[in-house]
Image (cartoon, rainbow, N blue to C red):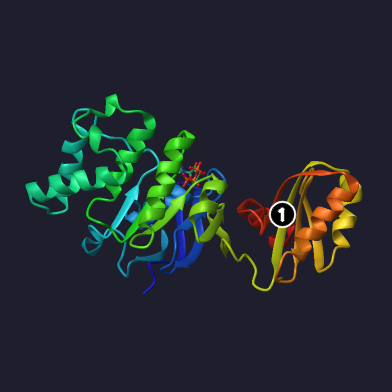
Amino acid sequence: MSLIKCDQVSLSYGSHRALDCLSFTVESGGPVALVGPNGAGKTSLFSCLCGYQRPDSGSISVLGHAPGSAALAGRLAALPQDAKLDARFSIKAQLTYFARLQGMSAKQAQTEAMRVLALVDLEGIADKQPSELSHGMNKRVSIAQALLGNPELVLLDEPTAGLDPANTKAIRELIKSLKDQTQFMISSHNLDELEKLCSSVLYIDKGQLTKSMAVESADAGVSYLTLKMMSADDQTLLPALERLTGVSKVEQTAAGEFVLQTQPRQGHQLESEVLELLSAHGWQYRMLLNGRTLEDSLFSSASQ
Ligand SMILES: Nc1ncnc2c1ncn2[C@@H]1O[C@H](COP(=O)(O)OP(=O)(O)OP(=O)(O)O)[C@@H](O)[C@H]1O
């Protein structure tokens, strides 16, 4: 059974088409990144998956059920982009309340509230009000809320937006620690973050799926080497890189930045050749990466 199956899903707000015949399938695996420019339709898609909005046409199945159906209660959870905690109640009271809504007894619900707070490393603030917490802490509590009752599938809409590096890392570590037991789908604009977390990427633009790929093996049978320079003469460097053994293509992705396409290779012969070339010209590099970044994978001309 697919975790998520969307077939020709369309959704319009008045005359504006936010989702346009969107079709994709998510099978079990690591976390899935949902990427796309502002207004691409990511939040609209999450709303449809949760059953908050009904598509105008097409069909959606989540864990084998229609969105919003009772069979999904406790199995699917979501962190909305603009999730807000209720200012009137303590953190523990709110989490306990939502656990009770899932059918837990008062005692179970309190235990569950403290369990999810421990997951986000915030047991110490259980009795505080939301106004006493930082933005990052509020976000982590909202993620804790999404984890109540151990749902199988969790949709996180921009979970790290506006967070400092420490809170971002805390959320990344949390998702990593849970990814074997919970399927995450994460919408974000932070490609570096998604690259560290996700196994596959869905890229949507203007409500349509334009790309779907695995993060680590963007193309079978092809390897990449990414080179970012501190200083170099790009005009001289590019053809010199193209002449290296086994290099089939070199793409310049920005000033001083190159992605070398090669046959799958064993050993580090090519890396050595690149370093020798740089050394011979006295050029300094900033990064030599085995593979290519998610940003390069999504936006290189080779993958258009
Ligand atoms: N309630 C609404 N009424 C009218 N138009 C809407 C509504 N919600 C979203 N839209 C429009 O639908 C399109 C898709 O919006 P959506 O919020 O799903 O995109 P998004 O990919 O999540 O964007 P972002 O990355 O900026 O959060 C946008 O053009 C947006 O302006």
Residue at image point 45% right, 36% down: 166
Closer to the camera, 271 or 106? Answer: 271
Pick the quarter of the image with the C terminus.
bottom right
Position above or below: 256 against 129 = below
Q: Could you say where residue 72 lies in the image, as x and y percent from the top left?
A: 25, 61
Residue at image point 43% right, 69% down: 27
Badge 1 crowding class, 10 Å Cα cut-off, few under 14, some 14 to 19, many 20 or more, is: many
Residue at image point 52% right, 61% down: 200
Count of number-bearing discs: 1
Left or right relative to 264: residue 82: left
Q: Could you say where residue 265 lies in the image, as x and y percent from the top left?
A: 71, 70
Pick the quarter of the image with the N terminus.
bottom left
Q: Is residue 216 visible?
A: yes
Residue 216 occupies which quadrant of the picture? bottom right
Amino acid type of the residue tagged 1 in the rendering: Thr
Outermost residue toward the top in this view: 132
Closer to the camera, 38 or 173? Answer: 173
Left or right relative to 212: residue 43: left
Q: Is mark 1 within 8 Å of ligand 1?
A: no
Q: Is residue 12 visible?
A: no
Residue at image point 16% right, 43% down: 96
Q: Could you say where residue 160 lies in the image, as x and y percent from the top left?
A: 45, 41
Q: Could you say where residue 241 lies in the image, as x and y percent from the top left?
A: 85, 57
Outermost residue toward the left in this view: 106
Residue 76 occupies which quadrant of the picture? bottom left
Query: Under tag 1, what secondary structure?
Result: strand
Mark 1 = which residue? 226
Closer to the camera, 202 or 195? Answer: 195
